[in-house]
């Protein structure tokens, strides 16, 4: 089995697949048969590594990625084992997308520590790579940091080396510290779905590229691999007017949810919508989700999402992002048919 091979310079396309065990296999086969480059599974109601491991048995070419796995819900050692297992099972096709989540979820849902998230994430990535290097080369594991220490690895607990090298690590972020961390230590940056083109190009990518340039100047080992920027676009489409209308409403409510979240306030501030953020946040505390969606007018919606039949949204997305990112993913309504998003990506591929 080999990883996908897309011609250099061509926009690569990543399909977001459902994590549900009853739906992942069909989605994986469909994505590969239609020439998509990567299959990604997010960590919401399921551990993404389990469905991706199932998908590995049903595919032979497409890359398999977490998009994202919650780093701070795991120790670096736990993540290292999960990722290595997927890499082995897929014949070297695993790509590990990591995200920090937000403080309430890490502390109150996962029961794990939260402090200095950008510094912790930087060390986390270094720790995972140190563990993988020990397994791949047989060198003694001697990682000591401010947050994590890994100094014990006996042969019985070390997996066999993997041909073709260790997995790539991509890092998601929104604020300046975490996005710079992606440029400093990761193999790529994952853009959050609630990221406008303006915020991405003005506020995010300059810091990412500056941090990456410093890592390259320092000749850090991981910079031998090319760095990639992955865009993610909120998309509503449908085969019928009724389906499109329902998905449009659901995506509008998703925009409202993100716009209400304090962690994403800088995105709203970039567009002068701080007052809207405050109002949405007040409603979210009271659980008034429908009212929140109604506050998202057409201008706000069009800044963060696209809506229409597949060919039309494909043209809009391609126009916005083709010269900005290296890879592209689209995110639909939570209950939308996954094939709709693949239809959009297939239409984007036809545009060149």
Image (spheres, rainbow, N blue to C red):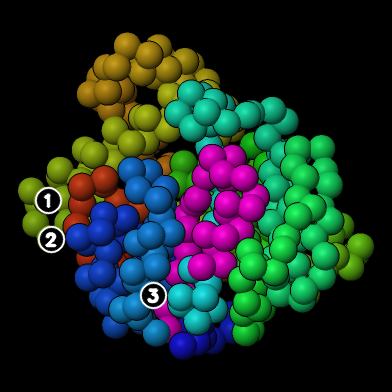
Q: Nearer the viewer, residue 351 or 51?
A: 51
Q: Quick one: SS at disc 1?
A: helix
263 sits to left or right of 30: right
**Please, is residue 2 above or below residue 266 in the view?**
below
Q: Quick one: SS at disc 2?
A: loop
Q: Is there CB contact under 8 Å for labels 1 and 2? A: yes
How far is the residue under mark 3 from the one under mark 1? 31 Å
Q: Quick one: SS at disc 3?
A: helix
Q: Is residue 348 magenta?
A: no
Residue numbers of the magenta segment? 61-85
Residue 239, labelled with which disc? Answer: 2
Spot occupied by residue 172 in the image (x, y as percentages of width and height):
58, 49
Tell me which label, 3 or 1, sits earlier in the chain: 3
Q: Which residue is mark 1?
A: 243
Q: Quadrant of residue 30?
A: bottom left
Question: Residue placed at 53% from the left, 72% from the top?
Answer: 87
| Residue placed furthest toward the right | 218
């Amino acid at each position: 089995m080999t990883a996908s091979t897309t011609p250099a310079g061509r926009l690569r396309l990543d399909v977001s697949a459902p994590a549900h065990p009853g739906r992942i296999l069909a989605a994986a086969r469909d994505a590969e048969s239609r020439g998509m480059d990567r299959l990604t599974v997010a960590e919401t109601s399921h551990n993404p590594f389990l469905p991706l491991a199932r998908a590995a048995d049903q595919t032979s070419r497409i890359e398999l990625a977490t998009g994202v796995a919650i780093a701070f819900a795991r120790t670096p050692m736990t993540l290292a084992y999960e990722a290595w297992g997927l890499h082995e099972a897929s014949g070297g096709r695993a790509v590990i997308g990591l995200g920090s989540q937000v403080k309430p979820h890490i502390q109150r849902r996962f029961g794990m520590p939260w402090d200095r998230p950008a510094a912790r994430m930087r060390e986390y990535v270094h720790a995972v790579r140190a563990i993988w290097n020990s397994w791949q080369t047989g060198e003694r594991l001697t990682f000591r940091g401010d947050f994590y220490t890994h100094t014990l690895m006996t042969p019985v607990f070390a997996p066999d080396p993997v041909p073709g090298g260790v997995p790539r690590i991509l890092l998601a972020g929104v604020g300046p510290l975490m996005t710079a961390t992606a440029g400093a230590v990761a193999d790529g940056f994952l853009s959050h779905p609630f990221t406008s083109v303006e915020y991405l190009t003005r506020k995010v990518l300059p810091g990412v590229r500056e941090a990456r340039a410093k890592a390259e100047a320092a000749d850090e080992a991981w910079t031998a691999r090319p760095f990639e920027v992955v865009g993610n676009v909120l998309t509503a489409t449908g085969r019928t007017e009724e389906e499109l209308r329902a998905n449009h409403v659901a995506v509008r409510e998703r925009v409202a949810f993100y716009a209400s979240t304090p962690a994403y306030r800088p995105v709203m501030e970039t567009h002068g919508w701080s007052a809207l953020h405050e109002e949405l946040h007040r409603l979210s505390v009271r659980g008034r989700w429908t009212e929140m969606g109604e506050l998202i007018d057409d201008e706000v919606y069009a800044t963060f999402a696209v809506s229409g039949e597949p060919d039309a949204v494909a043209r809009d997305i391609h126009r916005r992002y083709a010269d900005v990112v290296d890879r592209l993913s689209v995110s639909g309504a939570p209950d939308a048919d996954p094939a709709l998003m693949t239809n959009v990506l297939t239409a984007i591929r036809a545009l060149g």
